[in-house]
Image (cartoon, helix red, strand yellow):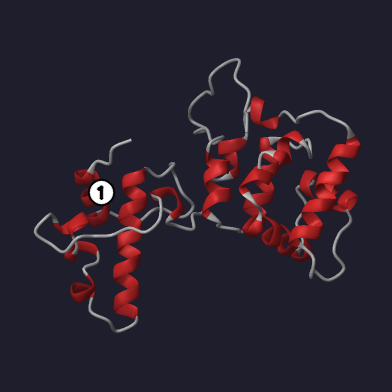
Amino acid sequence: MALDFDAVRRAFHGPPLASPPDHLPTQEELLAEHERIRVRCRLDLGLDPVAAGVGEHGSLIGGPAKPLTIIHRPVERLLRLEPMPLEWFDYPEARRAWSGPVEDEIDFLDRLISAHLAGFPNRPTAEEFSRWLRSPARSSRKGMAFYNVFETIWPIDLPRLLSRAHLSVYEVARAIIVSEARAPETIRWLHQFAVNPKMEPAAGTRPVA
């Protein structure tokens, strides 16, 4: 999809992304926020944003007469984003858990725990971790474990939380929100299921990974 550079510039000069977010950010808003952060970091470090060609001092925001703005990562991976509020994942299809053998779930969660909680003190068993994922109850231990998993989880394992761990989108969204993880790949994957609570999701649809 082609970027609307005028929209990037309008977003740059407009308000920053809201917290908590009130809409799914566009590619243009992500780029604008990235440029605002680059300017702020330069100023905080006592460096000259003009010399660095960031923000309005680069071509992306300032126009073609300015030094060329170079972005080294795909737009969707530029920012550590806050996930949409849980209400955006609270609709019937997102509440529906995937079915499958319990053995698959335990095997998958055991592997996930071994990979991402290897040094975690008194790490949970797969059965305990499964209960955590399905419960709205919060605790510091649970939050720390979720952070370690969702901050470093491999993208290929995100859809397996649905197909192998047999969780609902709602349960995964709740766990990610509790974790306070901001890994771009994790949040981008989650946001494909976000539906504005003021709008009705399309009838007959089912979230897919």
The answer to which of 107 and 5 lies nearer the viewer is: 107
Measuring 12% from the left and 55% from the top, which residue is drawn there? 64
Residue corresponding to mark 1 = 8
Relative placement, left or right, of 90 versus 142 is left
Relative placement, left or right, of 66 versus 207 is left
The answer to which of 131 and 47 lies nearer the viewer is: 47
Residue 143 visible in the snapshot: yes
Measuring 37% from the left and 51% from the top, which residue is drawn there? 30
Residue 6 percent across, percent down from the top left: 19, 45
Image quadrant where residue 56 sits: bottom left
Residue 160 percent across, percent down from the top left: 71, 39
Q: Quadrant of the N terminus?
A: top left
**Vertical placement of residue 141 versus 207, above or below:** below
Q: Quadrant of the C terminus?
A: top right
Toward the bottom, the furthest residue is: 46
**Vertical placement of residue 163 versus 36, above or below:** above
Residue 83 visible in the snapshot: no
Measuring 22% from the left and 49% from the top, which residue is drawn there? 10
Q: Residues within 10 Å of mark 1 (few under 14, many from 20)?
A: many
Toward the left, the furthest residue is: 65
Relative placement, left or right, of 94 versus 41 is right
Relative placement, left or right, of 105 versus 46 is right
Disc 1, SS: helix
Measuring 83% from the left and 71% from the top, which residue is drawn there? 121
Image quadrant where residue 34 sits: bottom left
Residue 55 percent across, percent down from the top left: 24, 63
Image quadrant where residue 170 sits: top right
Toward the top, the furthest residue is: 204
Total labels: the figure holds 1
Residue 46 percent across, percent down from the top left: 29, 84
Q: Amino acid at mark 1?
A: Val
**Vertical placement of residue 110 versus 90, above or below:** below
